[in-house]
Image: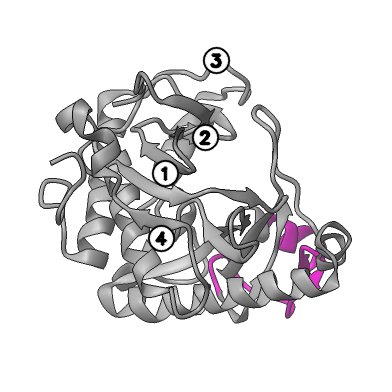
Amino acid sequence: MTETDLHPLVCYKRGKVRDLYEVGDRLLIVATDRISAFDVVLPTGIPDKGRVLTELSRFWFSRTLDIVPNHFLTTGEAACRPFGDMLAGRTMLVRKAQPLPVECIVRGYLAGTGWREYQETGAVCGIPLPAGLPESSRLPEPIFTPSTKANDGSHDENLTFGHVVELLGPDLAEVVRDLSLALYRRGQAIAEPRGIIIADTKFEFGIDEETKQLILIDEVLTPDSSRFWPREEYAAGRPQRSFDKQGVRDYLESLGWDKRPPAPPLPQEVIARTRARYLEALGRLTGLSSGSQEDGPCR
């Protein structure tokens, strides 16, 4: 499912992957099967992807409540019941919040744009790192490497912590940094015994519109917001096989695409391989598959 139309609900916002609808003073988040790469939504979806993202976010929201409150309320079955199986397992009813203008990224390993920046400068987001680290190496300690929150069609840009202080103020900047690092460490502690290395991830925070409290929002520790590696195959000094959409990025890079819309469609083998990786991540972390959701919504 790549598109939703929940008439008569009001579409509050349509993101790259999720559609948000107003349900009174709450929001209904619908995770579609859309997939984006290089900030462009692809014309081809990944079957069951939205269900995987929803189930994993629910899993992590329940396991991080002692660190920070979050926006999750329920699966939203009452709001989406008229739409039947179309939305089963894809919905979350959440509190409304004003998002902070910062992507809170934590890196525990040297990969992706962090690896490229380290090769050029010996640092990531202004944080100096030891010399001579190989690609994919585990960092001495996880680091907070925030970025801007880009508008549709533009690209995120890395920020130093000083820039975050300018955007949020010193007190709130320190809080979101410390919470991000604590959430990442909790994710590591749960995922690694289950065979997944979380190389890096992104968190989003917002201010609850009712309580004015800082809360965790959006999605948490999913293959869309994180770089997941199989622990049994890990070896520093090379790229890693991943459970996320890196395979999609690699395929698009091989085409020489200029990373501007419209994006090329994905072939069936890339779709099938990516779907299998998402489902394997779900299975390793939760023991579930897309067809065995606990109390899935709209049922």
Q: What type is the residue that disc 3 sits on? A: Pro
User: Judging from the image, what secondary structure is the residue with disc 2 in?
Assistant: strand
CB contact under 8 Å: marks 2 and 1:
yes
* Alpha carbon separation for disc pair 2 and 4: 16 Å
Residue 230 visible somewhere in the drawing: no
**Which tag, 1 or 3, sits closer to the chain's start?**
1
The first of marks 1 and 4 along the sequence is 4
Q: Amino acid at mark 1?
A: Lys
User: Mark 4, residues whose alpha carbon is within 10 Å: few (<14), some, or many (≥20)?
Assistant: many
Pointer 4 residue: 228
Read off the residue under disc 1.
245
Which residues make up the magenta segment?
Answer: 115-137
Q: Which residue is mark 3?
A: 262
Between 285 and 123, the residue placed more toward the observer is: 285
> CA–CA distance between discs 3 and 4?
27 Å
Instruction: Check disc 1 and report its element: helix, strand or loop.
Output: loop
* Amino acid at dot 4: Phe
* 156 relative position to 231: left or right: right
The circle drawn on residue 37 is 2
Residue 114 horizontal side relative to residue 25, left or right = right
- CA separation in Å, label 2 and label 1: 8 Å
Of the numbered discs in the image, which one, if any, rests on residue 284? none
Mark sitting earlier along the chain (3/2): 2
Earlier-in-chain disc, 2 versus 4: 2
Residue 128 colored magenta? yes
